[in-house]
Amino acid sequence: MIRKKVSDWSPKITEAFFIVVPLLLVANLSIFFLQLNGTERTLKEWNQIVRPADGGNLPAGMVKKLRQSRLVSVGSILFLTVLGVGLVLAVYLVWRQSQRQQNLASRSLLDLQEKMNAVLHSAPLILWAMDNTGACTMAQGLGIEFLGDSRSLLGRNLFDELADFPVILGAIRSALSGQTCKGEYAFEDRWYETTMIPMYSRTGVKGMVGISVDITDRKNRELEVELANQAKSRFLANMSHEIRTPLGLILGFIDLLAVPDLEGSEREKYMSKIRLNAEALAALVNDILDLSKVEAGRLDVDWAEVGVQTLLNDLKESFETKAVSKGLAFSVETKGELPKGIRTDPTLLRQILVNLLGNAVKFTERGAVRLVIESHPCEQKSFRDITFQVIDTGVGIMGDHRENLFDPFRQGDPSTARRYGGTGLGLALSHRLAELIGGDLQLISTVLGGGSVFQLNLHAEISESFVDDPVSLAKEREEGLTRSVRLAGLRVLMVEDSVDNQVLVSTLLKRNGAEVSFAGDGKEGVEKASVGDWDLVLMDIQMPGMDGFEATRQLRERGFTRPILALTAHALREERDKAIRHGFDDYLTKPVDRNELISKIESYGHGPGHRLEPDIRQEPPETRDFPRP
């Protein structure tokens, strides 16, 4: 408080003392010399007046008093002089302190100004002000460049400049009325978070100052998230429809099968409908799982040799009937000499082509669907560039929907889902699968109402010595349903809590000659497996009480060396690897592939089989060494 008062009064004190004190010193010195001369003259005058004729002196007492008066005058003058000099020194010290504080304040102000300039010139920030008339009195900051006008805003009337932005003008008028306003405002193609603060004078509000921060990037991200959420919401709505439709048909046809007087032909027709819808439902679930695994980088590529002609025959057999039923022509055409076999992932390649052909048939009302395959030589003699073109005369794709064509959860047009069904996963999944097998999927051309051309480019290793297997997938599907003795003499213990799964799997195994017994949970499975003479154990993983992992661990600790195969609905690779690390010999997934199920049981039941190993790319948890069969 004292220092502040000194700082406030020091300029006035300094000015007064530097004027008054020198005057006092001059006056004191003048008085001193005047008094000195006056005393000497007084002595001389007295000597002339009262001195005797014989030259006698003044009385000693008078002389003494005159000299004392002289000393008092000299002393007072010296005191005043010392006092004046002291005051001058004091004022000088006060002045020096004041100058030091002013310099410090100036440096602080300069430092603050430099920091403000650094912020204003390095961040998308605008600091602006205006008076009551609307005239801009200040405009600084890097963000001014984003306004699209390089001219200075100073002096311009902001009411006129912002006439097309009534929301901003409303906030400005509120600030000029004395309210502090804060909000997010759109200006042309950018967004600003702005705070408007009124400025006061003695008579009231004299203007306002605004601080605007460019938040365009943040708003764009929020918009992207919102659009993504909308797309996912539409996807979930479509997914619900796609799941409930085949599920409802399956339940409905099952009810029809329960009719007592149902004829054999009708029964076969209903069974066919149930199977087709069940396969569609399983394919939908597989697409979702595959896409999630691709997005997470967890889908593995199983490289193997595949016969090109067999693949084409299977595709033709699968889609020709569907196309003809819609009145469409369907053809598979080859250009040039195709290799007998190529090395790729047969499942993923077939899945891509099935998705493309399925879309072509679905979105084509009249005309034709063609699959054109062409082989081109390349620099590497053991490789060929193979193109698969799917050409249709369907509805085509709108121009503004082509950019999102390979994005998951999106369809070209929201009305597409209502008219044709589907979830929008097929093309997105196919595009990613093509990259996994070293290929590329492209939209070559499309005409609205005139059809589209999709092309899969594949750089594949060829195998001219490959012996093509003429057995089609249709025949393979029927193998597991025919009676055989492939599993004759095998005793299988199935540890499964679902009675329906027990009935389904045991029926398939018994039709192929196996003997099947059951355990309803992991604990019962451990007890039965420990005391029985089993050739193989089928073990579910997710069960109430003791799960399959714990049951298998206890069996291996007890010295059980027979094969244990996991049979579970978990289809992710990490679950597979976890099962193998916990002592399982192999891993089968639900829905049950009957051919794979019978082949695995035949392999492990009649011989040593081949025990799977976990993926070495993942760090396995701490496990014990279990004895192997």
Image (cartoon, helix red, strand yellow):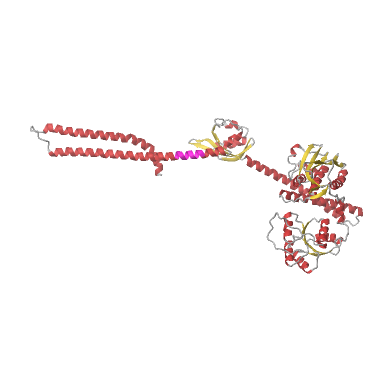
Relative to 278, say whether 204 is above or below. above
Residue 287, percent from left and from top = 77, 49
Q: Is residue 108 magenta?
A: yes
- From the viewer's perspective, is 74 left or right of 228? left
Residue 299, percent from left and from top = 74, 51
Visible residue check, residue 500: no
Kindly identify the residue that appears in the image at 74 percent across and 37 percent down. 400
Kindly identify the residue that appears in the image at 28 percent across and 35 percent down. 25
- From the viewer's perspective, is 205 left or right of 445? left
* Quadrant of the frame with the N terminus: top left
Q: To which quarter of the image does residue 546 belong?
A: bottom right
Residue 283, percent from left and from top = 80, 50
Q: Nearer the viewer, residue 295 or 418?
A: 295
Q: Nearer the viewer, residue 610 or 377?
A: 377
* Quadrant of the frame with the C terminus: bottom right
The stretch of residues the image draws in magenta is 105-114
Kindly identify the residue that appears in the image at 78 percent across and 66 percent down. 529
Relative to 14, say whether 582 is above or below. below
- From the viewer's perspective, is 267 left or right of 531? right
The prevailing secondary structure element of the residues shown in magenta is: helix
Q: Is residue 397 magenta?
A: no
Residue 409, percent from left and from top = 74, 45
Relative to 608, say whether 147 is above or below. above
Q: To which quarter of the image does residue 418 belong?
A: top right
Visible residue check, residue 157: yes
